[in-house]
Structure formats: structure tokens, C-alpha cells
Image (tube, rainbow, N blue to C red):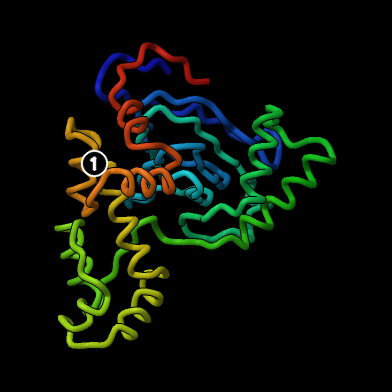
């Protein structure tokens, strides 16, 4: 598929009827400003990228996955990807006979260091079909670790919980809000401990972690505009750009300047194989 010099180019990934091996590693470069048409496979897929952020729509639900996370789509799950930036994409295709330990529903998976190391090894050796004994052993470990890795519904989950929903709504409207957990507890006529338990129960993360992820997702949108980076930092509640840059790089693997450069550069034709 050739990416024309337009703001967005849509393509249908090349679909095959069956995998060449029970676990098949598919990796290639995708130009920024492209998106795939909705499609599905007869096998499961683990979608991940080396740097930046992968945006996908899975069964009509938007999912945002930074580097260090992966999106799992079981067999026969409709999905499409939005590649807003230049990315190095990797898909671990897994036959249904090997994926029974993985979730039945699409979700995000926090990738443990060992999983990342195995994938890096396979990609660096340009292994796609898993055929020899050594690589079968590696992928056996890979599948076990993926099945046991921490699973999340989304990078930025939400909830209808009556105590949390007003807090999330206010933060979404103003990501620069500095109110502490204790301040929110007073406003909600409850205790800090109760709010902490609610965040862990309904969002499976702390208040501070959710708020930081909101800043990442908001920054991804702000950086598409010509706003100076220090101004973006200010809009997110940072007093200086350095703390914002550190936070953004932690979650995406890129500095804000590099991310912006990748999504604004006009790319020439590129062949996706």
C-alpha cells in the first residue's frame, strides 16, 4: 500500500487464509497519517509498537496503547488501527489452539521486560515463522508470560461509579487541576481511603496514575497543534516543560518534540509489505 501525500490514507491489510506457523511474527514500518480498514482474523493478535502510541478501534471501542503496552484482539474480533505517526509495528499472530490461556475479550496488556526481550530478539533476527526448537521454546515462554501479564481494559479506563465519575469528568475538562485526593474526598463528603479503594476496584490503578495517563492522552492531542511545548506543559498543569517532557517520554518512549516531528512530517510514498 502506498501512502500518498494526504492527511490520511486508508488501506486494507493483506489478509491470508491461514498462518504459516502456529505463532507468526509480523513486523514492518507504517507511515504516519495512515489507517487500516476494519478487518478481522481467524487467529488472535498481540499488537505493539517500539515507540510512540498505537491507536486502535476494537469492536467499536477506542483503545490507546503507548510503548510498553500491547493490544490483544482475540480471533474474529473486528479492529482497525490509526497510525497518526511513523511507527515500527509488530503483530504476534497466535493460532487459536495456542491462545486459549489469553483473554476471551480484547484488552491491553502491560508487557513485562522478559516479553519485550523475547520480541526484540525475534525481530532483531528477522524471525517470522516459528519453526526451530529454540524459537519454539522462546515463544512457549512468551505465551505463558503474556497470559500471566497484567491486563487492563484500556490505557485510560473510565467508570460510572457515582463517587469517581464527577472527579474524572472534572479532570478531563481541566487536566491542569491540582486538587489532591484529600481535597476530592472533602468535596465528595467521603474519605481519602474510600476514594483510593474505589480507584483500585473500578479503574485498577491509583488516582495519581490515572491523572498522569490523562495528561499523556491530552498531550497527544495538544501536540498535533502548533502550540509551543512549554505552553502544552502549562496547560497540563506543569510549572516547567522539563517535568512534562520526562513524564511524556516515560509513557511513550519519545520526547514531545520528536513525537510532534513524526506526526507533522509529510512522508513520501512507502511500500507496506
> Residue at 50% across / 51% down in the picture?
72
Residue appearing at x 48%, y 20% in the figure = 272
Q: Quadrant of residue 19?
A: top right
As drawn, 227 above or below 202: above
Q: Is residue 82 above or below residue 180?
A: above
Total numbered circles: 1
Residue at position x 42%, y 70% in the image: 204
Rendered residue at 67%/53% (across/down): 143
**Quadrant in which the N terminus is drawn:** top left
Up/down of 202 relative to 215, above or below: below
Q: Position of residue 47 (x, y in %)?
A: 51, 42
Element at label 1: helix
View extreme (right): residue: 133
- Please name whichever residue, 237 or 254, is drawn nearer the observer in this view of the structure: 237
Tell whether 61 sits left or right of 237: right
Note whether 78 is above or below 1 in the view shown.
below
Q: Position of residue 195 (x, y in %)?
A: 30, 80
Amino acid at each position: 500500500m502506498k501512502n500518498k501525500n494526504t492527511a490520511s490514507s486508508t488501506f486494507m491489510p493483506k489478509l491470508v487464509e491461514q498462518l504459516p506457523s502456529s505463532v507468526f511474527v509480523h513486523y514492518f514500518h507504517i507511515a504516519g497519517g495512515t489507517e487500516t480498514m476494519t478487518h478481522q482474523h481467524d487467529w488472535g493478535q498481540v499488537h505493539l509498537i517500539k515507540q510512540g502510541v498505537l491507536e486502535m478501534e476494537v469492536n467499536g471501542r477506542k483503545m490507546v496503547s503507548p510503548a510498553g503496552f500491547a493490544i490483544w484482539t482475540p480471533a474474529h474480533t473486528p479492529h482497525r488501527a490509526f497510525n497518526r505517526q511513523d511507527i515500527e509495528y509488530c503483530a504476534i499472530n497466535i493460532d487459536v489452539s495456542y491462545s486459549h490461556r489469553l483473554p476471551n475479550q480484547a484488552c491491553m496488556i502491560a508487557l513485562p521486560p522478559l516479553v519485550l526481550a523475547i520480541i526484540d530478539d525475534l525481530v532483531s533476527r528477522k524471525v517470522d515463522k516459528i519453526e526451530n526448537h529454540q524459537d519454539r521454546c522462546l515463544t512457549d515462554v512468551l505465551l505463558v508470560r503474556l497470559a500471566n501479564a497484567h491486563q487492563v481494559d484500556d490505557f485510560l479506563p473510565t467508570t460510572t461509579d457515582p463517587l469517581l465519575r464527577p472527579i474524572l469528568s472534572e479532570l478531563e475538562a481541566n487536566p491542569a487541576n491540582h486538587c489532591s485526593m484529600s481535597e476530592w474526598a472533602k468535596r465528595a463528603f467521603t474519605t481519602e481511603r474510600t476514594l483510593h479503594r474505589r480507584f483500585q476496584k473500578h479503574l485498577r490503578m491509583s488516582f495519581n496514575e490515572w491523572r498522569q495517563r490523562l495528561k499523556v492522552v491530552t498531550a497527544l492531542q495538544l501536540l498535533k497543534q502548533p502550540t509551543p511545548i512549554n505552553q502544552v506543559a502549562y496547560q497540563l498543569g506543569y510549572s516547567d516543560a522539563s517535568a512534562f517532557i520526562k513524564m511524556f517520554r516515560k509513557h511513550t518512549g519519545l520526547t514531545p518534540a520528536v513525537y510532534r516531528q513524526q506526526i507533522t512530517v509529510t512522508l513520501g510514498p512507502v511500500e507496506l509489505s
